[in-house]
Amino acid sequence: MSIKETEPNIESLEQIFQQVTEAPKSRQESLLVELCPDLKVQAIVRELLKADSSDELVIDRDLFPSPIELSEGDQIGPYKLLQKIGEGGMGVVYMAEQTVPVRRKVALKIIKPGADSKQVLARFDAERQALSMMEHPNIAKVFYAGATETGRPYFVMELVKGRSITQYCQEQQLSIREKLELLMTVCHAIQHAHQKGIIHRDLKPSNVLVTEYDGRPVAKVIDFGVAKAIESPLTEITLFTGFGQIVGTLEYMSPEQSRMNQLDVDVRSDVYSLGVLFYELITGSTPIVRERLRTAAWEEMLRIIREEEPPLPSTRLSDLEWDNTAAPKGPAQAKSSQAERQKLSRLVRGELDWIVMKSLEKDRARRYASPGEMAKDIHSFLNGEIVSACPPSIVYRLQKTFKRNKLAVLTSGLVAISLILGLAGTTWQAWRATKAERIANEERDLAREQAKKAAEAERAAQLEAEKFRNFDEFVRVNLFGFQNGLPVGTLEKTADPNITLSELLDQARVRLSNGNSKHEKQTSNQLYLKLWLSRSNWNIGRFACDVRRGLRRQTAFAWRATPGNT
């Protein structure tokens, strides 16, 4: 089968051709194979690339028959074409002048030359039906729909003389509050479309134009060309998205749109695109940077859209690397620009971060259920009220991380468990060793204390024994006159057998007072002996009453001074 027999999808060809041409020449061939496995379509794109790089037209004329081109000044019904103002995947937009029944300038969108497949016709008619169903001040109005003499369908809508919402905000240097108020009107417009059963599916700055009425900016949503009916078909011609075909713009595409299963797309897909638009209005950059998407392989692009979480808007603002505004002319302007971004980052941090990130949730069940809910939170923020959005919990983040990196998480978990078990075992052993050491120290201290007490008891017993021996020796020597088992003075003279107890006590007192006793220098023993002598004299009634009080004091002092007495 020749290439001539192929019936290419013009929109798909345009998307593939655009991505391949933006890639470096050294990578164009490999990228073409990745994006398009169909050899016939590859051949068509190669012809387009060849024509794009050459000054002469070399495309096979039989492949794309040349329809009658429209030009400025042509008449379509009551509409005179004035200027081509836009071109999309399936249609061309002209500024036209209506002459009857009223004179006014309008936007006329007509099917693109060569894009006359059934699928494109169905989409074009769907857009016409979608716009005719909606009546909202922030959605471009449809005035008329018809077909040319050659059968090319067109419709006429309100001419919006404006710029894209991002361009307008940048040129007018709108404040955060003004941007949010403008974005709220866009949310309400998309909410209206959803209530009419229409999902836009291609929300991006170029499809949200801003014009001024009475000096106030007014947003207008246009281009429902890839809109999808929520409940019922918009046209009798079969309208469906081919298997494996992606509809939308990559930077603003929701994760479910990138899964090539358009049956799973609902109103929350538009919420995601509004979140991307919100992010870009605040930071000046899309969550996923365009340059990265354009240089990545096809499957990698889709993976990024589905899985990678963008940084918080405040984080992106605080990172001066992402300052993609006009370059300042001097150091003072550069410093001022950095200070403004830091100030804006502090303003955005918190609730605005939460609102944006909730609309950008990869899991659509966690997004806002509708653009109306998103607008309500923005309104609450502007009025200082509580917003419903809140940062995702740690448990939720861990669950998402586990789903994306099961093998890595399981491996890390096993390593962590091993470390914890090892640490627990080491801690248990250290605790046991510490406890054993504490018990040993306590037992050692107890043993030392018991040994100390035993030594003190032994010393006390020795003192008592010494005191008893001294007393016994004194009584025997000084009282009874015995020494070494014999009476004192036995060798000199014989002891008087008639000596009385009083005389013996007097002799003992004299010996003790004259220092003849070897116990004199032992103060405690001396006092004890004096006490004993005093008590002995007291017992035999030798002291008078007037002497007793002094003796009582002396004996009391001697008794307290004796070791062991208190």
Image (cartoon, grey):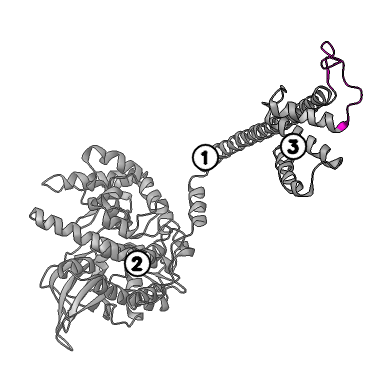
Q: Are marks 2 and 1 in contact (CB under 8 Å)?
A: no
Where are the magenta residues, as a range?
Answer: 481-501
Q: Look at label 3 and name its amino acid.
A: Gly
For the question of whether residue 432 can be seen, the reply is yes
Q: Residue furthest left?
A: 330
Answer with left or right where residue 271 lies relative to residue 540.
Answer: left
Answer with left or right where residue 234 lies relative to residue 105.
Answer: right
Residue at 27 percent of width and 80 percent of height: 141
Whole-angstrom CA distance, mark 3 to mark 2, is: 88 Å
In what quadrant of the picture does the N terminus appear?
top left
Sequence-first tag of 3 and 2: 2
- Based on the picture, tell me whether residue 231 belongs to the magenta stretch: no
Could you say where residue 523 lies in the image, as x and y percent from the top left? 68, 31
The prevailing secondary structure element of the residues shown in magenta is loop
* Residue occupied by mark 1: 412
Q: Quadrant of residue 515?
A: top right
Q: Residue furthest right?
A: 497
- Check the image and report above or below for 418 versus 9: above
| Badge 2 density bin: few <14, some 14–19, many ≥20, Cα 10 Å | many
For the question of whether residue 327 can be seen, the reply is no
Could you say where residue 380 lies in the image, as x and y percent from the top left? 37, 76
Whole-angstrom CA distance, mark 3 to mark 1, is: 75 Å
- Which is more foreground, mark 3 or mark 2? 3
Q: Look at label 1 and name its amino acid.
A: Ser
* Residue occupied by mark 2: 352
Q: Look at label 2 and name its amino acid.
A: Leu
Q: Which disc is residue 564 wearing? A: 3
Comparing 33 with 47, the one in front is: 33
- Based on the picture, tell me whether residue 495 belongs to the magenta stretch: yes
- Which is more foreground, mark 3 or mark 1? 3
Could you say where residue 316 lies in the image, as x and y percent from the top left? 29, 56
